[in-house]
Image (spheres, rainbow, N blue to C red):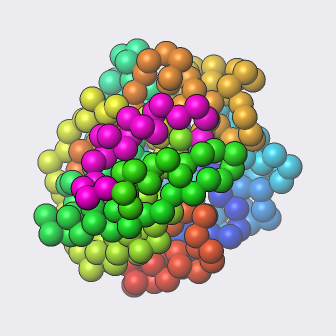
Amino acid sequence: MQLLIFYLTDNNRHYTFPHFINLLNKSCQKNKWQLMILTHADDELFYKLHLEKYDINTTIIKVSEYNNYLNKTFVASDFAKKNNIPYMMKCDNDIFLRGETLDYMINNLHFLENNNHLTMGPVLSSGIPGIEYFKEYFLDAETNEKMNNLFLKTVFYNRDGATYDFLNQYTINSNIWDKDAFFNSVKSMNHHYKGIHPIRINEESLQYLNEYIIKNKDKFYQNHELSVIQNDNSPYLCNSIYCIKTDTYIKILNDTSLYVDSFDEVPLNKYAWMNNMNHLFIKNGFAIHMYYNWKNNHLLYENNFCDRFFG
């Protein structure tokens, strides 16, 4: 077994799982990966029933609700270590990934043996920094330009102890969207929460993107020529989905000096900064992330997206 996919979930998003597992079932390398479903709700039977029709090697584990996110990461990493699984893939329960993209990542996990690279992941539709690659390779030129213009309408504001309003110089106080200048400015921030981008707070741009994805869903299902983007220099990875070496992930999880909250996102990014490492992405390896929880009633909007995209 080469890769452990650990799927972090609860009972709030059961509507995503049938689509998620159906996509992964298209993988041609099921002998190389194992799925671990980690929940903190009494819903193990739900997953068992949906998995009965698939020949996917799966383990379902329930953890305590208290500090459940980190509990899940430690359970998964312990399992991978004990079973000699060299790589792990963290996946939240609001992600849709094609089996073909998963297979390509599995075939290229050796890139993570290079000390310059910490993680590998798909090009995530509203991911940070994935949105910029998704825009470039998935959208047509006119839609891409429309997205850039919508980004310019973004009003940044301060929250969670971080100062973001200075970034308005790249949006409402600018005539062009310059992603490189924006990311370089984010990199200079003296704060650990650097997972910021217009796509996260500009609801109009995200809704426009999702409408385009729904109308062009055939493009998502098409096979594209894939390759590894090795030179990404963005300052922060919002870690909804990524592959990482098991030993490295365990080292990050166990380094208490890296934590600022009860999640692994900041420790992951701090480790990358400290060791001058970047993140790899799969060009044309598209994946979907529908909404951020900063949006009011985001679960309602997600449900509607699923009905329209998969219906």
Q: Does the magenta portion include 290?
A: no
Q: Is residue 114 left or right of residue 226?
A: right
Pick the quarter of the image with the C terminus: bottom left
Quadrant assignment, res 107: top left
Residue 166 at what x, y percent from top left?
Answer: 49, 47
Q: From which residue to which does the magenta span run?
A: 174-193
Residue 272 position (above or below residue 204): above
Q: Is residue 105 visible?
A: no
Residue 137 at what x, y percent from top left?
Answer: 20, 54
Q: Is residue 190 visible?
A: yes
Residue 305 position (above or below residue 256): below
Of residues 270 and 23, the one nearer the viewer is: 270
- Give the residue drawn at x 31%, y 46%: 179
Residue 130 at what x, y percent from top left?
Answer: 36, 49
- Give the residue drawn at x 55%, y 62%: 292
Of residues 152 and 102, the one nearer the viewer is: 152
Quadrant assignment, res 104: top left
Quadrant assignment, res 305: bottom left
Of residues 295 and 167, the one nearer the viewer is: 167
Q: Is residue 102 left or right of residue 165?
A: left
- Give the residue drawn at x 77%, y 56%: 40
Q: Is residue 201 left or right of residue 98?
A: right
Of residues 276 and 51, the one nearer the viewer is: 276
Residue 83 at what x, y percent from top left?
Answer: 60, 27
- Give the residue drawn at x 53%, y 34%: 189
